Image (spheres, rainbow, N blue to C red):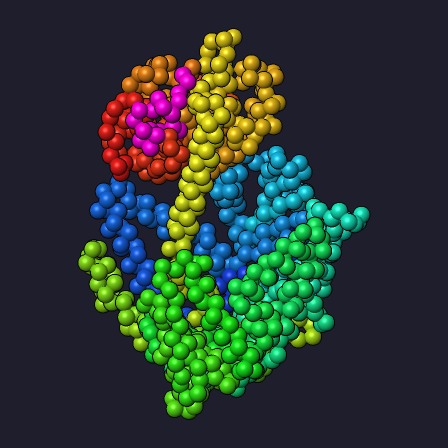
């Protein structure tokens, strides 16, 4: 009995263990969910995976260890709470807490990681998009909100695939296209494409090779240095190009029977051998390091040939100021690059009608005539291959000391080009309608010619020496340049920190950039104490735990860990490589829960993005209304009156049954096709019109609501009072539109710029073809965002289209009498200039 009991207990324990193991989220490698054929791939490991490495970086020490980030976060929170209190917003603290807490989803991805891949398709174009939120299975209920942000609002369906509960949506516009999401072990997966869930699940279960077997994976992950890689990505342009290579392009080519294909254009541009573009970001001690590449094997042609420039080194750089903290230099054979660029253009023009080449020759002739010389054989003939832009802080503050230098290979040719340009300056000024004559001042310094063109507060100057051309906004930095060339002033030499950064980078290159973030922070920090004091004046302390002015860390503490950022680019037989080493790039910083800190910019960015999104939608809605206004004016020009609010129809007594005025303007709104297909003698719900009335007119939809169905979010203004749509045109309460009212611009006695024609509406389901409902009268306050349906999705008010075609944003808290005055065409009321 004891043995049997023991065996039973043992078997039960094993069974429970197996059951518990099968129910727990299994360890799934995020990479196993991305296909080997990923043409686009980006993967961020998350800060937790690299917390130790990130804590060693200079950026972490400067921003987090110094206390600057903590100060910024606390100050922002305090200021927002104070502002909300002053505005008297109820529940403002709760709203603020919700706002700051709204970053939690982004924060999770920031810490745990996220990866994205897109395939072009294995057998012809059949793309698959895969988005994996690492260790985010618990966030699956947030996907509908994410889709809602992209105006995808359908109710998801459910299905089961190999034991996984999958939610999905089918695209009504693209049959077969599906958006699906589900939990894959600890991860949350979102797939887009044809049967995306089935394809990704099969990959996860080993039925196919994942992205780790892609040759670009090893190339991006494995580096020659000891950097700890945190971010990788690539775009395999070659794979996408080759897949679409046979595809014909809609290019007119009357002289050839064969259509122009993607492959033809790629050859003409020199992109037929272009492969992948990719790279990685990692951490190496105090530095953040980037290595990127462009695969383009030699011999290169077309656009890619422009990468084949002579290599340069530090000794080839011009004499820059000894305290120069920012410069960028590159190598370019300008004369050859001009010839190669023209060849690329001419190669592409072979696919165009013959007159395209003639137009190009005419443009080139005009350019040469304007400059007084041939661009290639004149302007670029004498210049060398080294170009450098640098900051001369001694010349002028706030960036006005930016100067340039170009090497010289033939001074006589340069002087001839400058002389030709000098002769053309008066003509160029006249063509540009410059109000005063342009005069050039000629001076010399130690045998160098200096030309200065006074222009207001600036005096652009160019100096030509034996070895260098110097260009500045003033003569002084140009003279200082030649003094350094003569050894009369000290020139820049790499410091010990520069040498440390450059030690791990190639010694010869075609471009180099050096930027010392300490100098920018020093300039910024000179204003920070004043700004800090001002902020605390308008938002004083709110308790013993509030941030104080003295909490701002000293400038020296923030700047001390930093060092110059350096980057170089090098072409080779297989392509172009870029390497950089930075102390303060835009790079990750770990978050607070692990004893670290969330960047201030993360907290600021998310509400800023939301505001930017609303601003963009407001602008788009305003543009929609301007298009409507233009259509109204064109209609008026054609018929000498505005469209009647409903299409006249004696058989249909109810305005709600007739077609709306938005049908009448279709020919003037680039929708003649729909207008011609509909029968104006029938109602909008009649069988003859029903199908076409259900078509979507995107410019009738307010982007603030989304663009679903055949609704309009813009309505005509009928006037004041419930009977306004029925009033005669000479009534002082009549507006621009009535059920049967014909309004001419001459009837608008209040002035077109003082009279509202259309407005946004709060009603989201008004069919655009429906008469009656598409015009609104003012009947009850508040007139904006009130019971009449005039208003919109944007905070604070709505857009109004005026009779002159302009669009104004009218506040919902404005004077109701002003809104009434705007809504009538001959009320005789005074309308303030600003409303």
Question: Which of 452 and 140 lies nearest the eye of the viewer?
Answer: 452
> In the picture, residue 217 is in which quadrant?
bottom right
Residue in the image at 54% along x and 56% along y: 114
Residue 242 visible within the image: yes
Residue 781 position in % (x across, y down): 28, 25
Question: Which of 329 and 128 lies nearest the eye of the viewer?
Answer: 329
Residue in the image at 70% along x and 69% along y: 300
Reply above or below: 145 against 438. Answer: above
Residue range highlighted in magenta: 741-758
Residue found at the very far bottom of the displayed protein: 487
In this rendering, position of residue 350 left or right of residue 82: right
In this rendering, position of residue 516 left or right of residue 164: left
Residue in the image at 32% along x and 29% along y: 751
Residue 25 visible within the image: no
Residue 811 position in % (x across, y down): 30, 36
Residue found at the very far right of the displayed protein: 257
């Amino acid at each position: 009995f004891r043995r049997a009991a023991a065996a039973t207990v043992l078997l039960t324990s094993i069974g429970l263990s197996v059951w518990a193991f099968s129910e727990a989220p299994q360890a799934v490698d995020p990479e196993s969910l991305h296909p080997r054929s990923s043409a686009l791939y980006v993967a961020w490991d998350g800060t937790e995976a690299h917390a130790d490495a990130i804590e060693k970086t200079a950026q972490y020490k400067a921003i987090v260890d110094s206390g600057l980030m903590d100060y910024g976060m606390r100050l922002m929170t305090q200021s927002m709470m104070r502002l909300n209190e002053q505005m008297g917003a109820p529940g403002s603290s709760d709203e603020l807490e919700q706002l700051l807490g709204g970053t939690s989803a982004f924060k999770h991805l920031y810490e745990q990681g996220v990866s994205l891949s897109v395939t072009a398709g294995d057998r012809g174009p059949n793309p698959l998009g895969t988005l994996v939120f690492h260790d985010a299975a618990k966030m699956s209920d947030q996907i509908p909100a994410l889709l809602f942000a992209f105006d995808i609002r359908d109710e998801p369906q459910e299905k089961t695939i190999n034991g996984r509960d999958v939610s999905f949506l089918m695209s009504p516009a693209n049959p077969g296209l599906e958006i699906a999401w589900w939990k894959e072990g600890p991860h949350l997966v979102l797939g887009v494409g044809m049967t995306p869930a089935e394809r990704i699940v099969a990959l996860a279960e080993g039925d196919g090779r994942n992205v780790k077997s892609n040759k670009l994976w090893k190339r991006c992950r494995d580096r020659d240095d000891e950097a700890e890689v945190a971010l990788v990505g690539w775009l395999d342009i070659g794979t996408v190009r080759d897949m679409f290579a046979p595809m014909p392009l809609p290019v007119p080519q009357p002289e050839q029977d064969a259509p122009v294909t993607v492959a033809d254009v790629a050859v003409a541009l020199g992109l037929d051998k272009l492969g992948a573009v990719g790279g990685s970001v990692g951490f190496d001690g105090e530095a953040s390091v980037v290595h990127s590449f462009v695969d383009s094997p030699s011999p290169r042609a077309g656009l890619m040939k422009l990468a084949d420039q002579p290599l340069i080194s530090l000794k080839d750089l011009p004499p820059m100021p000894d305290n120069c903290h920012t410069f960028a230099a590159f190598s370019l054979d300008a004369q050859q690059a001009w010839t190669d660029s023209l060849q690329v253009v001419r190669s592409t023009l072979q696919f165009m009608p013959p007159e395209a080449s003639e137009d190009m020759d005419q443009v080139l002739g005009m350019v040469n005539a304007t400059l007084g010389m041939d661009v290639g054989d004149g302007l670029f003939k004498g210049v060398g291959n080294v170009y450098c832009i640098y900051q001369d802080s001694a010349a002028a503050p706030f960036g006005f000391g930016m100067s340039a230098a170009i090497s010289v290979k033939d001074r006589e040719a340069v002087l001839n080009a400058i002389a030709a340009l000098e002769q053309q300056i008066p003509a160029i000024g006249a063509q540009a309608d410059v109000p005063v004559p342009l005069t050039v001042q000629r001076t010399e310094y130690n045998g160098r010619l200096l030309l200065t063109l006074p222009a207001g507060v600036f005096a652009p100057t160019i100096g030509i020496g034996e070895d260098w051309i110097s260009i500045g906004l003033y003569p002084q930095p140009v003279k200082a340049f030649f003094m350094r060339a003569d050894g009369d002033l000290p020139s820049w030499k790499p410091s010990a920190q520069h040498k440390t950064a450059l030690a791990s980078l190639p010694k010869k290159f075609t471009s180099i950039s050096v930027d010392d973030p300490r100098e920018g922070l020093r300039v910024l920090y000179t204003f920070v104490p004043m700004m800090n004091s001002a902020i605390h004046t308008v938002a004083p302390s709110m308790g013993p735990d509030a941030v104080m002015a003295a909490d701002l860390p000293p400038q020296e503490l923030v700047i001390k860990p930093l060092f110059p950022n350096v980057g170089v680019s090098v072409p080779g037989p297989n392509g172009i490589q870029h390497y950089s080493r930075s102390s303060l790039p835009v790079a990750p910083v770990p978050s607070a829960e692990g004893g670290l800190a969330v960047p201030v910019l993360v907290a600021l960015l998310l509400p800023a993005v939301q505001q930017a999104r609303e601003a963009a939608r407001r602008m788009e809605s305003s543009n929609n209304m301007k298009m409507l206004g233009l259509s109204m004016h064109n209609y008026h020009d054609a018929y000498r009156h505005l469209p009647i609010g409903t299409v006249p129809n004696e058989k249909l007594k109810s305005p709600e049954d007739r077609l709306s005025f938005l049908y009448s303007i279709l020919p003037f709104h680039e929708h003649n096709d729909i207008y011609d297909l509909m029968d104006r003698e029938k109602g909008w719900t009649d069988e003859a019109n029903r199908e076409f009335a259900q078509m979507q007119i995107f410019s009738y939809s307010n982007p603030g609501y989304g663009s679903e169905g055949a609704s309009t979010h813009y309505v005509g203004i009928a006037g004041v009072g419930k009977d306004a749509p029925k009033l005669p045109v000479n009534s002082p309460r009549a507006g621009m539109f009535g059920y049967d009212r014909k309004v001419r611009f001459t009837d608008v006695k209040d002035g077109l710029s003082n009279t509202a024609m259309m407005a946004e509406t709060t009603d989201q389901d008004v069919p655009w073809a429906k008469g009656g409902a598409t015009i609104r009268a003012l009947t009850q306050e508040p007139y904006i965002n009130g019971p009449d349906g005039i208003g919109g999705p944007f905070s604070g008010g709505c857009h109004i289209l005026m009779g002159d075609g302009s669009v104004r944003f009218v506040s919902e808290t404005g004077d109701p009498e002003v809104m009434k005055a705007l809504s009538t065409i001959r009320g005789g009321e005074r309308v303030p200039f600003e409303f």
